[in-house]
Image: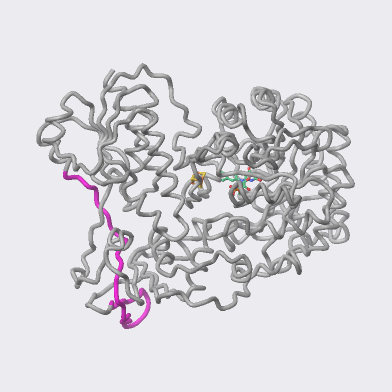
Amino acid sequence: MAAYPHLFLPLKVGSHFLKNRIVMAPVETGLEKQDYFDPRVVEFYEERARGDGPGLFILGNGVVHETGLRNLKDPVLTAGLLNNAVRLTSVIHESGSKVLLQLQHHGAGADHMFAVSASRFRNRDTGRTLHRAPGLLVSHLISQYSLFAYHAILHGEFDGVEIYGGRLSLPNVFSSRLFNRRHDKWGLQARTLFAVELVRRIRSFVGPAPIISYRLSLLDLHAGGSEWHDLLAFAQALHYEGVNLFSFDIGFTPNSVPVNSDLTPAGVWVPFMEKFSREIKVPVIFGHRMPGPDRLDDILQNNITSLVEIGRPLIADARWVEHVHTGKPVRPCTLCPHGCTRPDRREGREMLACIADPYVLRRSHKHPGGLDILVVGGGPAGMAAAREGALRGHKITLVDEGPELGGLYRLCAKIQGRSSIAELLKVQERELVELGVEIIRNTRATAQWIEDNYSGSRILLATGKESCMPDIPGIDTPNVLSLEDLLQGRVPVGHRVAVIGSGNVAVDVTRHLCTHDLKAHDEWCCAWGIGDPAEHIGGTLGVIPHLNPAPRKVYLINETNETTEELFAHERRLYEVQWLRMHGVNIFDEANVEQIDSHSVRVSCEGEEGSTILRVDHIVVVGDREANAELQNELTELGIPFEAAGSMKFKAPFGTAGEAALDGIYVLQALEKRSL
Ligand SMILES: Cc1cc2nc3c(=O)[nH]c(=O)nc-3n(C[C@H](O)[C@H](O)[C@H](O)COP(=O)(O)O)c2cc1C
Ligand code: SF4
């Protein structure tokens, strides 16, 4: 019997047959800014659609009006733009899949001077005060939605549209009692009128056949958010007006609860969604941090949902559906906080980039190949350069001093919640072998070794960075550990630990040191104050009951002049800091470490008198790193030309693995050009 039979059953939605139960979630690529249907976007979807692809695609972020742009540099849909959509919709249709265009108005999430909301209010995340949308504009916006739905279906050949109604979007704020304080017809007496009218108008424009999906805010995750009965009545009204598919978003803002992060157990939202689908007899799409294919198949078999939506896993592995269907290993998404979900890239300033597939959206140009290239260092940059070189037909040798590839990135797999990194490296290493890359392990390349064995080869160095200790009195004390010491488990770490460092890596390490099993669903929901799905759906935040104590007492000493909260507010990952506090971590911000002794650290903080002595068993320093430049210097001395790639070139102590990998690819291409 085929693997996962329920995932691959067809389904009828409205008048359309979907070939399987898998939906590719809307993911804006960042290229929309230049051309919504850029050839690279077409290629991105073609790669995912061909053969065994998802039965349904939803294309993200089709903004219907200037007031609804997230920022003013992004494009607004136009009729002309939608005529060009046929390039994209036809490649999806050729593979037998269907495609919807998501119609968006970012509403109170928009960050520019023309942004509007249901009522005037200040968005604390963006600091922006939103104008109240005048009645005439509200009617105009409804016309714009309907017009673009019509164009998308008639000229762009989409099979339907999805109205985005999540996370502070205009339909979301209009339907919310927190944000809609209007006294006109769109106001308090009929908060849902905006969305209902929108659906009614679109259905009347496009006729009965196309799919109209509505992305509901299932849980607002905010005190005063929609209650369960509000949501049901709203969904029923939308269905009555012509919605024939529902999908979900969760939370007003990504700041307070880790909706999709690795802190969120896979499948945690399913019980909330199940409660919804038991009441509403319309096909529903469940997404967000979904579990693996085994559980997905069970969820479908038990009629908990009609369709499952996959986002990041389909970015990480374009052939995710085929690999699941044929039982081949999937290239996993590692849920990295610094990849595709980075706020700067989500705001359209950068193209989609992914550590699992660093070259996503940047497809290789054809190249005759033929070079002999030695890549030194098997971290993300070296592996990506080797893969790219082999794909372009070069003979690649990759040498690494360790028994396994991955460098510091492999060590990160030991951090709580990051174990999928090891899985990813395994898949990537197998890909290198399949591409014919010769891998030499346990060999520290010296300039002499290179001259003796690879004198005719082009050399690409990706030797990364290593820890270096800051200049603090007592730093030589034996109980001071580097990141490598900690993650390689060189020393059993005691019960009281101070972490010196700031930013993501320091927070990750701190979290790792107070690892706590958050897998149990109830405990998780309780921890974040979300409430019991059986009771109600509107969550109340801020009530955070005491959790089991963390296995050790951890102090985080942040030596920068920004507080940890400020650093993470920019990242929109305040929940990470909240998580640390929930686990009893004491954070010292704007701190200065004055002295380290064998069992204590003396810390003083900006603006505070005196210093604090922390009794600790170990001190972990994650602050400074410097390029591993020994080989670089030797090669320079011998006059052997080379190109350096990856984190060894980065100014910041830590780059992201994705940035390093991308740099590896760019340097490989530069080296190739110079060799022509
Ligand atoms: C790069 C990126 C872009 C996204 N763009 C959109 C979008 O335009 N519209 C939308 O409704 N959701 C968007 N999302 C959210 C996804 O549709 C999906 O809900 C989320 O990634 C969680 O699903 P996953 O755990 O399967 O990735 C985006 C997510 C990512 C990672
Ligand atoms: S960038 Fe990271 S989170 Fe995004 S798809 Fe790739 S591996 Fe997953």
- Does 622 appear in magenta? yes
- Quadrant where the C terminus sits is top left
- Does 425 appear in magenta? no
Of the pair 612 and 372, the residue shown nearer to us: 372
Left or right: 146 as drawn, with respect to 408: right
Of the pair 34 and 50, the residue shown nearer to us: 50
- Quadrant where the N terminus sits is top right
Q: Is residue 27 visible?
A: yes
- On screen, residue 557 above or below 457: below
Q: Residue at x 53, y 60 (%)?
A: 263
- Residue 224 at x, y = what percent? 73, 68
Of the pair 264 and 188, the residue shown nearer to us: 264
Q: Is residue 65 visible?
A: no
Left or right: 350 as drawn, with respect to 187: left
Left or right: 434 as drawn, with respect to 616: right
Q: Residue at x 80, y 41 (%)?
A: 140
- On screen, residue 335 above or below 458: below
Find the magenta span and give its range. 601-630
- Residue 623 at x, y = what percent? 31, 60
